[in-house]
Image (cartoon, rainbow, N blue to C red):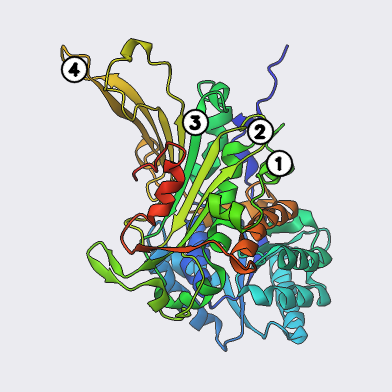
Amino acid sequence: MPELENPFQETLLSRHRAEPCSVVIFGATGDLTHRKLIPAIYNIAAAGDLPPQFKVVGFARRDKTDEVFRNELEEGNRQNSRQGHNDELWKSFSQCIHYHRSEFEDLEGYKSLAKLLDQFDAERGTPANRLFYLASAPEAFKPILEMIRAAGLNEGVKGKWARVVCEKPFGKDLATAQGLNAVVAATFAEKDTYRIDHYLGKETAQNIMVLRFANSIFEPNWNSRYIDHVQITCAENLGMEGGRGGYYDTAGALRDMVQNHLLQLVSLVAMEPPTDLSADSVRDEKVKVIRALRPLVGPEEVGKHVIRAQYTAGSVDGAPRVGYRQEDRVNPESQTEPYVALRLMIDTWRWQGVPFYIRVGKQLPKKATEISIHFKKPPQVPFATSTMLKNSENTLVIRIQPDEGIALRILCKQPGQAMSIQQVKMDFRYSSSFGKASPEAYERLLLDAMAGDATLFARRDEVENAWRFIDEIENAWHKSDTPPTMHEYPAGSWGPKEADDLLRADGREWRLL
């Protein structure tokens, strides 16, 4: 009898075959294009994975020539390319880059874009696929989508596909997300809609499923019987540099990070095994996790399980930092949180009674994102009278950034005659194990969008259910007569003491990064 096919043994090559296409970037003069998108496409080209006859069209309001646009992008690529900058490669690669000037609300600009894309098809000798990337400010998404539809660009040509990639934030609450989803749905089918979350493009985030479901030492133990709790930390050592305060003060950590990035990581850790690796099978299981989050309703309940805080003046790495309310473009009376810590409960059979502790904050001591799985302690009968087992839990640490890898902390006896026990670390790093750095998240996600693989992109119901959970917290903070306290912490610390108290009340503490 032939061996059944194992979907987890499916190779990257078999899943990622990018088809020839033209990528149109709306908001092409912005920071995202220069720092992330063009360097990612360049690195794809350097790896030999760019499809033939590939084109990039930058769509923006400013008046530029192709040559000026290419020169500006070259400077950004020199600074941000993962593989460095090769002049000869850039010379040939840059010839696929073009610039198209238009206002986002000008239908004639989209009609002339259609003619330009048709011209590329004529030069190729065959029609090509079209990928529209919304890298503009979120408020421009609606007019861009409406103009794409009005110009007929959403229909593809002669059996070729047309897809759209939407950058975050996807809405600012449930109502706006539903409204934006309605606009997207009127222009593109759900199968052609790719809501991007770059955290899911990181190699270690993708490896969570393989770690869980392809290793028999973990899967039987991945439940409430063996796991005590889970921690997810996303720490940043920066504040509102580069004028970011204007946007951030309207969003905050809960909307900017928890609703998308961190809930995505929660769903990967907590999901049930999918029936296969198809996009909908994986996303079906992730949605179930988001729907199973225990709601936090009302200021009293939110106050028990969620800590919000602003940083005050302090120092990070010896450099002085001002407080959040003193940052550029931040309201001096701001009630926006640059730090949030949550205790989440997932009401499923697998996770009943297991808390998930999440924290994210700015102006913390270091930049790092990690997931730590804290296993329950075994019965300590042989060592019942020993003090050697303080902090003796086994911990599985999944590092998302900056140094992607996985570490398992176990207990071992120290050499010598005494029964002295010490925690040791078994460490896996991508850079040392595979001899090369992992691809950047945007490289993987752009290739996926070109290949039609939506596994690592958020589905409509996933986004809306996440907002439904987040809105209850936001309402308690901003629409209640008795909102929970806004706490404080000095820049350069690990957050407010109240966040420590959140775990201490459960007999636990945050893992030191």
Mark positioned earlier in the residue sequence (2 or 3): 3
What percent of the width, then of the height, locates residue 300?
59, 55
Mark positioned earlier in the residue sequence (2 or 4): 2
Mark 1 residue element: helix
Mark 2 residue element: loop
Q: Residue at x 55, y 30 (%)?
A: 212
Disc 1 target residue:
288
Amino acid tagged 1: Lys
- Of badges 4 and 3, the one in the foreground is 3
Amino acid tagged 4: Pro
Q: CA distance from mark 4 to mark 3?
A: 30 Å
Amino acid tagged 2: Glu
Q: CA distance from mark 1 to mark 2?
A: 9 Å
Q: Is residue 348 left or right of residue 492?
A: right
Mark 3 residue element: strand
User: Is residue 309 something one can see in this rendering?
Assistant: yes
Q: Residue at x 49, y 64 (%)?
A: 36
Name the quadrant containing residue 105.
Answer: bottom right
Mark seen at residue 228: 3
Disc 4 target residue:
415
Q: Residue at x 35, y 69 (%)?
A: 312
Judging depth in this view, the residue of 349 and 124 nearest the camera is 349
Mark seen at residue 272: 2
What percent of the width, then of the height, locates residue 126?
75, 63
